Image: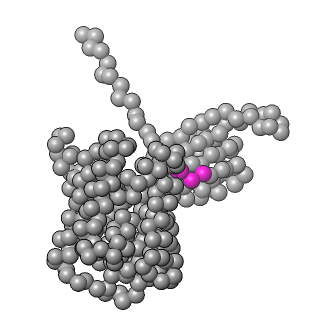
Amino acid sequence: MKIKNTILDFSMITLGIAIVSSAVYFFLIPSSIPVGSITSLAMVLATFIPLKISFITLILNVGLLILGFLFIGREFGAKTVYTSIMMPVILGLLEILFPGYTSVMGDPFVDMICYIFVVCAGQALLFNRNASSGGLDIVAKFLNKYLRMELGKAMALGGFCVALSAVFVYDVKTVILSLLGTYLSGLVLDHFIFGSNIKKRVCIISRKEEEIKTFILNTLHSGATIYEAMGAYDGQTRREIITILYNHEYRQLMDFLARTDSDAFVTVYTVSEVYYRPKILPPPADRS
């Protein structure tokens, strides 16, 4: 079973890297807009160094891996090493299969938008398998360890620095598009990763507690927790129902509350992740 899961993991990671590499080759490189990534840095360097972008990307990734192992430690694991090597390999394969590829869209801005959506889909697939495309992730770990910077901010800083490197090669318009693309890619990636997991935490204080609880349990087939709460103004004790729902369940609940108790006090929070590990109870002892 462990071998089967490993094969599935690396198959999905390979698919994710293939999607990311395709986005880079078919949209990012033809647009000549270096949206923050190691491959974008390779695009800038390729204007000074007579090497293919795939080979420069390989040199950068391997160099960062070596530095990471020397100064950060063995925190990367097989997945990071695999993705860091596979990315330039697939890029090199695309360079052989589609030599001299030019933009189909014919518009750098449209190319950039297409790149963002495709690459974020591939990165989301990687993150769901606890992997990444390497490159700037390693730079972010450097900043995290030596400058005590949060990983999210470190990733953003690395991306914007790469985007700003376009100033040495391209015009002001391209630099602005690079910065904009880097920012938008972060927003879209958050949507791909967290958007499908968004839930609502609904807190309800109502005189119709039993009806609401029954609706949540039997109609929505969801769980709920009930707390005792004391009002600060009158000192009276009331019971508060708290439940976590998907968006469509939340709409059903709000429709039910409008019909059942329009005076109910309801607060709603957005929840991006819920962790729940049910305890598996041991089987009862055999008393025969």
Q: How many marks?
A: 0
Residue at image coords 69%, 49%: 264
Q: How is the image coloured?
A: one colour
Residue at image coords 45%, 64%: 159
| Magenta stretch, residue numbers | 269-273
Residue 107 location, quadrant: bottom left
Q: Is residue 218 visible?
A: no
Q: Is residue 186 left or right of residue 57?
A: right
Vertical position of residue 157 compared to residue 116: above or below: above
Q: Position of residue 120 (x, y in %)?
A: 38, 65
Q: Position of residue 12 (x, y in %)?
A: 24, 56
Residue at image coords 20%, 56%: 11
Residue 60 location, quadrant: bottom left
Q: Is residue 126 left or right of residue 86?
A: right
Taking the magenta stretch, the answer to whether it contains residue 270 is yes
Q: Position of residue 215 (x, y in %)?
A: 54, 47
Q: Nearer the viewer, residue 251 or 166?
A: 166
